[in-house]
Amino acid sequence: MDLNNLKSNPIVVVGGGFGGLATVQALLNKSNGTSVILIDEGHRFLFKPLLYELLSSELQLWEVAPLYSDLASELGFIFLQECVVEIDEIEQKLITSSELEITYSQLVISTGVTTDYSFIENLQDYACGFSNLNDCRKIKKLITKINNYSELTNPIVIAGAGPTGVELACKISDLIKNRVEIYLFDKGDKILPNCKSFNREKAIDAIGKRNIRVFLDYYMKSVDRTFLELSRNDNEINHFIKINYSTLLWTAGLKPSKSKFVHNFLNENQKIKVNEFMQMDEYQNIFFVGDITFSENAPFPSSAQVAMQQGSLVAQNITSLREGNELKPFQFEDSGEMLSLGIGNASITGYGITLAGPIAFEIRRLAYLMRMPGFFLSFKSSGSWLFSKKIINRLFSQSP
């Protein structure tokens, strides 16, 4: 391998989510003068765990979705708002939709996942996900409509009782002040099946205090513009519910983002099978990060902290590859989980604490804001939290 030749071409990262941006930051921290290019179709990085607080206006857009151009100026990488349409693994180059051709030394693919509407025919015509800023805007309009027009009484239906569905149900219920009932259903037999038991218990308590009905062991059998039908998993004839709904929010499935070039790498499970170093065995200078990856030897959950740890490890391995050193295997270190459970309420298990309530909400918010990419943005966001009169009053002006 000609390392001198590799140094003449940039390291390219495709996909600016948690994994991609963590890779870029870690590469720049190890910088030896090699250019780092980040390519993404959008113009903003989205800190998805705080999308609920953007929905409720507890946080502002710049705190949750900073511009890539601002991050590039601060951190020192090159940002291209482009769509990659082809990768030539042999020639080590990629081509974008604007016919821009970029030769790379190493390539990192972190294109992430998006809402999967393929479970039922025409589902996308009737459902809205919660994975991007456009989804957030749609749900904000719905909340405003419910709060302004008393004749809107049909329930909101949320598919999927994982973290996204549960957090969304609690937040929306608070925002509409229980004016409309929320139906939360899941094909499993419990909510938050993969979460910590403490957080699950607190979520059950939070749901019980709100106008939320939970339907477990149910799947959606059909849907049209005004009605949907839920059926029990046992498929008994009488075990079904027909609901006249106002809005259907779909959080019950994800699939790889629509990038065409990614499909060349996907296996039968719509994942990219990687080795312990986050590569495909066939392509030693291409690394993969985030929710699109799968390892048979050491399965890991799909989460932001996994993607960020993978990004850091991949940056280290790229440096080792360029210097002719041994690569290190990925080992996930679980630092805990945090759930938003309505306005001003959260549950935390990890970081050395187990806590729920308003203080947990503030700790969660500060912990996430401190993880924002770039020192300036992290400092500005954390400072906004610290000097908020609302926070100061809440934490330090309690009656003795």
Image (spheres, rainbow, N blue to C red):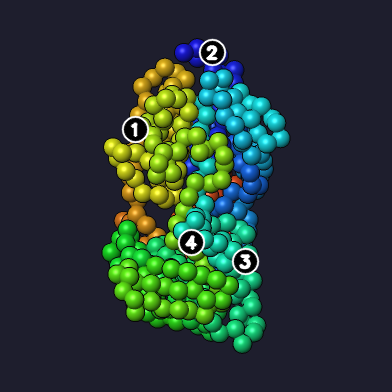
Residue at x 42% of width, y 65% of height = 160
Q: Which mark is residue 120?
A: 4
Q: Position of residue 345 (x, y in %)?
A: 44, 71
Q: Do tag 1 and tag 2 residues touch (Cβ < 8 Å)? A: no
| SS at circle 2 | helix
According to the picture, the residue beneath numbered tag 2 turns out to be: 4
- First in residue order: circle 2 vs circle 4: 2
According to the picture, the residue beneath numbered tag 3 turns out to be: 138
CA–CA distance in space, label 1 to label 4: 36 Å
Categorize mark 1 by other alpha carbons within 10 Å: few (<14), some (14-19), many (20+): some
1 vs 2, front mark: 1
Q: Is residue 189 visible in this depiction of the protein?
A: yes
For the image, the number of numbered tags is: 4
Amino acid type, residue under disc 1 in the picture: Glu
Categorize mark 2 by other alpha carbons within 10 Å: few (<14), some (14-19), many (20+): few
| SS at circle 1 | loop
Q: Position of residue 338 (x, y in %)?
A: 40, 60
- First in residue order: circle 3 vs circle 1: 3
Q: Which mark is residue 276?
A: 1
- First in residue order: circle 4 vs circle 3: 4
Q: Position of residue 280 (x, y in %)?
A: 41, 30
In the displayed structure, would residue 355 be above or below residue 37? below
**Left or right, residue 320 beside residue 393:** left
Residue at x 36% of width, y 22% of height = 326
Nearest the camera: 126 or 146? Answer: 126
Nearest the camera: 294 or 108? Answer: 294
Q: Do tag 1 and tag 4 residues touch (Cβ < 8 Å)? A: no
| SS at circle 3 | helix
CA–CA distance in space, label 1 to label 2: 26 Å
